[in-house]
Amino acid sequence: MQSPVSSLGERLRGAEARATLTALIESMRPDLLRFAQWLARDRSIAEDIVQEALLRAWRSRDALKEPSAARAWLLTIVRREHARLYERKRLELVCLDDALDLPDGSAAAVADARLLTLRYAIMKLPLEYREPLVMQVLGGFSTEEIARELALTNTAVLTRLFRARHKLRTLCGASPAPDATPGEERA
Amino acid sequence: MICEDARLAIGADPEAAGTELEEHLRVCAGCRAFREEMRRVNADIRRALEEPPDLRVAAPRRVAPAWREYALAAGVVLAAAAAMLVWLLRPTDSLARDVVAHIKAEPDSWLSTLNVSAGSIDHALKSSGVGLDLASDKIVYAQSCWFRGHYVPHLVLQTAHGPATVLILRHEQVKARDNFREGGMSGVIVPAGDGSIAVLTRGRGPVDELAGELRQEVHWLPEPATR
């Protein structure tokens, strides 16, 4: 039987752990929101996704064993929440030409035009290409982790990542590299 | 490892490293250049993703007075007329500039050393309605490129003086031979039937001689209806 003193100590440690996790989650919120926005392409939907994801994360906080794994863990929950929402209801399509904030002609906007073109091109990528790219570049996931998360083979993920960059490279003015395009997606 | 596998690995992760890949890159200049370019593209992608997408909050539309609509329509007509006038009066050398800009955008093309398959050459030519009686073993690069509103064959030929780039411009008419030097390249655009041919080399190559030969070898096929 536990003594009242050790029980209090555990409670204190538990409270401390919860406070640490809360602080950790809050510090990652901007990253999670940005990740969700690149997936959902809509700020209010992204906010809903993050809200729901954080709720799920809190409920299953015992699953997080290592604080260093928190970022990948939370991003995975956000991605799954986006996938769940995407499957649950057909999201209203956003007309990117109307929705994107295009350059206003100011000097700063002109200077950043290339980057803006690229952001626009990323937004226009189909989800099957955008999702692994955002997971890799923004989330820091490895090919194997993306494959596991998206239920694809490693080669299929490599092909999608290749095609995503290939499309962006072409959309941004460069032409396709010779002999560089894989044919059918290899399973 | 072959080029296709190397480029798949690089395109999927430009920072990827592995023994096989590094061994391949040591001997393949084309794939090395491809990795450098993909790393640049990837750095831009990273920068682009660092900020959340800029989605504009939809603002309520204001109703504009009727005279504004007429003024807008008149402005559009005037702008279209001005654009048409500029297009009609455009100097020939703007074609040369566009050709040079296009070639600069495909730096990989100069690096190719392996012969292109007959199928790829055939595709690049026929999809633009072009026939070429040229030995395919001279061609080390063949792409069908979007140029000034049309797909055009973009070829690189291996010559005794080094690589020479050829754009066969079925829809660009020039009145006379136009020699130019720009961006470290020398080039010439010559009339060929109803269109023209651009030939460029790095440095001072025998572009006139090559263009003369190509004029004899190019012929126009019925243009493909759609693509």
Image (cartoon, coloured by chain):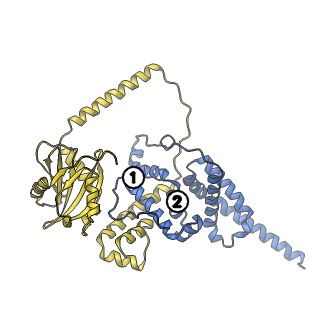
Residue identifier under label 2: A134
- Extreme residue toward the front, this view: B222
With B67 as the anchor, is B122 left or right in this view? left
SS at mark 2? helix
Q: Quadrant of residue B28?
A: bottom left
Q: In the picture shown, does residue A56 fall above or below A7?
A: above
Instruction: Give me the C-alpha separation between circle 1 and circle 2.
Output: 17 Å
With A68 as the anchor, is A156 left or right in this view? left
Most foreground residue, B52 or B66: B66
Report the chain shown in blue. A
Q: In the picture shown, does residue B8 fall above or below B177?
A: below
| Residue A122 - label | none
Q: How far from the left and from the top, in percent, is residue B36?
A: 35, 66
Report the chain shown in yellow. B
Q: Of callouts 1 and 2, which one flags the residue occurring earlier in the amino acid sequence?
A: 2
Residue type, label 2: Val
What subunit carries mark 1?
A
